[in-house]
Image (cartoon, rainbow, N blue to C red):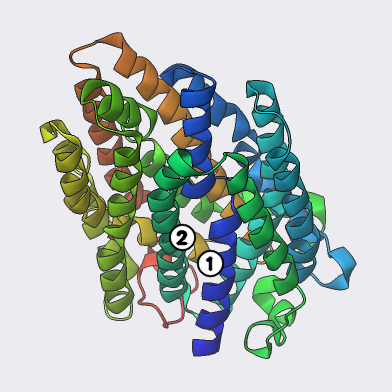
Amino acid sequence: MNRTFLYFGGLTLFISLATPVGYLVDIQMSYMLKNQLHATATQVSIFRLITAVPMYVAFLFGLLRDHWNPLGMRDRGFFLIFGLVTAAAYLGMAFAPITYEGLLIGMLLTMVSFRFVGAAFEGLMALIGQEELVSGRLSVVWQIVTYIPYIAGALASGYISSHLAPRSTFVIVAIVAAGLALIGLWKPRAVFSHAYDKPQARATTFTADVARLVRHRAIYAPVLMMFLWSFAPGANTPLQFYLTNTLHASDAVYSYYNAVFVASFIPTMVLYGYLCKRVPLEKLLWWGAAIAVPQMIPLLFIHSGDLAIAMAVPIGLLGGVITVGIYDLSMRSCPSGLQGTMMMLVEGALFAASRGGDVLGSKIYGSSPTNGFLYCVIATTIVYALILPLILLVPKQLMATTDGEAIPAPA
């Protein structure tokens, strides 16, 4: 089992570094829009909203993953083909002139290509999580390793913005994406030995699978929970502009805030990894959701860039348990043979909420010069509170066991 965790940990690292929605690319992109193209807060948030369109329909990429076997290599074929396509798209952006339209088209192409990689990665991970009864621990490994490059990217993006040409970022991630393609040639037995032969991997026809997915009651709660958890009107563009324009902090402070914020999730994620083998998922979801409700309130007490960075610690600590809990529940909720589709529904909900919440937050922020950010934090807190009643919609058998225990059949 340790070899399984090592494989997914290494794969997660490459994917997190190469993803177009990672901090290394996303924050650098926002700097280019804000500082070089003089975009407003609303324009930056709309750019993010449009370039995330492939994420809103990510379930289509999941369906393709569940029914397509590229090069006869299944998920590894997706890594190989679309890792190379993503690398080529990044290189194209690196050497093209910097314009709003050019960045928009380049990011859309990259997002489409990388959705195939993401569908294969998350579908494979959910399949193994179900087969080996390790969805909780795999979720912890996945999220922690994902966050490490995000932390490094958030820290490095401020330096890159100040010292390196914008195209350098795209060259770096292009190299990483090419490395991801090479991983597609690796087939460790600990992961791939008979993985696609077990009952959890069995799909039917495309039409029958779509109907089966719609009828599968378990999918709805985790998708809605992820949507609400990601719908944070005050967390992205409004916070960036509040720090730099209202508090007059440097661009680097926003990067450092994000680095500390994400790093602070890790201790409570580690705690989840310990508890999930001892405490049923139902309790972890209730605990995690309850402590996450006031997560953004400390932002109301920041009056300087340094204090914002300090406040990022308690803010991040409050979010670790519910983040992993939702992914754990998502893996448990996958219908057989539709792991890619289900996980992409969850990812689609994440990005639709994140981008939509960012646009709404930017409008709320701009509605009042004095209280706009306060209104953003209040809106975020109300949305988080709505996660709690959704736990009641989860089928009881999916939450009744600890990690490693077989999930009982529905009564």
Q: Which residue is denoted by mark 1 in the rendering? A: 13
Instruction: Name the residue tied to disc 2.
Output: 149
Judge by depth and name the residue closer to the eye, 397 or 282: 282
Is 149 rendered above or below residue 387? below
Query: Is there a contact, CB below 8 Å, between mark 2 and mark 1?
Result: yes
- Judged left or right of residue 379, residue 215 is right
**Secondary structure type for disc 2:** helix
Element on which disc 1 rests: helix
Residue 286 visible in the shown view? no
Q: Residue at horizontal 32%, vertical 56%?
A: 322
Q: Which mark is residue 303?
A: none
The x, y position of residue 122, in whole percent, is 60, 62
For the residue carrying disc 2, how many other residues have a C-alpha within 10 Å: few (<14), some (14-19), or many (20+)? Answer: many
Q: Please state which amino acid type lies under the numbered disc 1.
A: Leu
Q: Earlier in the sequence, mark 2 or mark 1?
A: 1
Q: Position of residue 19 (x, y in %)?
A: 59, 52
Q: Position of residue 297 (x, y in %)?
A: 16, 37
Q: Amino acid at mark 2?
A: Pro
